[in-house]
Image (cartoon, rainbow, N blue to C red):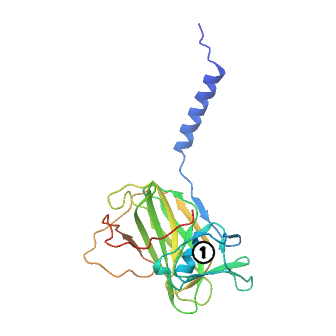
Amino acid sequence: MKKRYSANFIFILSCAAFSFLVSELPAQSQKIQGDFEKKRGLPEKHVLNTMAEKFDFTIDPPQVLPDGWTLGLSGASRGGRLSLITDKNQAYSGDNFIYLLKGQLVVASIMNVFPYDEVDISFYGKNPAASSIDFILNLYDGSSRVGLLESTHGIESNEWTRCNVKMKVPAEINKKKFSTARISLKSNEGVYIDKIEINIIKSGEPVKTEPAEKEEAVKPGSTKTVEVLPAKPEKPVTRMRFDE
């Protein structure tokens, strides 16, 4: 006697087979952010406006941010500036570019990351005087930040120059697992930035590390891992605030 299968059973079996085939395919690169052509306004009483006033941080134009980005402000942001500049004759691409001095410009979206992923960041930068830009990959377990990776890139030209930063995601950090990440960038000396693209590449290859004989200063273009200690501060400190 031949067995008969219901249409629902055949449908479920087909979905399972498709899911298995998709899981066997190599993971693809994921684009996170592009240009600064779109902008968004902040309500007058938004917390970022309050923080900016507290730390004498200038948002120019007032209450306007590039779409897809937010700000992280703390005491280290004092006297800084984020300018969204509209000038197609000066921009590398499109009409808009930004100037960032202190503070942290943060990708608004939270990303899913896995061990051995590679974060590839390309952008165009310039500055009349030599400066640098720091890229920070904050790693989270749920809502708790368990550690971060930081990469510094030098900006030494007054002309738009293409720059590239790569950060390899470890299996764990501070002996803790993580599942999500957020990228931010800052410049203590100030830098112009345009056409930034952030990609997560699913490489699946282990991080190669070699024990260093002695600690060396971090050079432009290098990457360092920052250990986050669990100890609590003795005095209240101003914490970075994100617009989520």
Q: How many marks?
A: 1
Extreme residue in the front direction = 45
Extreme residue in the top direction = 1
Provide residue 44's location: percent of width, then percent of height.
66, 72
Residue type beneath disc 1: Asn
Q: Classify 23 as above or below 165.
A: above
Provide residue 123's location: percent of width, then percent of height.
59, 75
Q: Which residue is mark 1?
A: 49
Q: Give the quarter of the image for residue 84.
A: bottom right
**Residue that appears at 57% across and 80% down:** 53
**Residue that appears at 53% across and 67% down:** 242
**Residue that appears at 46% across and 79% down:** 75
Q: Secondary structure at mark 1?
A: helix
Q: Give the quarter of the image for residue 139.
A: bottom left
Q: Classify 187 as above or below 65.
A: below
Q: Is residue 107 left or right of residue 236?
A: right
Extreme residue in the bottom direction = 129
Q: Classify 12 as above or below 226.
A: above
Provide residue 116's location: percent of width, then percent of height.
43, 58
- Front residue (pair 207, 229): 229
Image quadrant occupied by the N terminus: top right
Q: Give the quarter of the image for residue 30.
A: bottom right
**Residue that appears at 54% across and 93% down:** 129
Image quadrant occupied by the C terminus: bottom right
Q: Is residue 221 left or right of residue 21?
A: left
Mark 1: give few (<14), some (14-19) or many (20+) Cα within 10 Å. some
Provide residue 77's location: percent of width, then percent of height.
50, 80
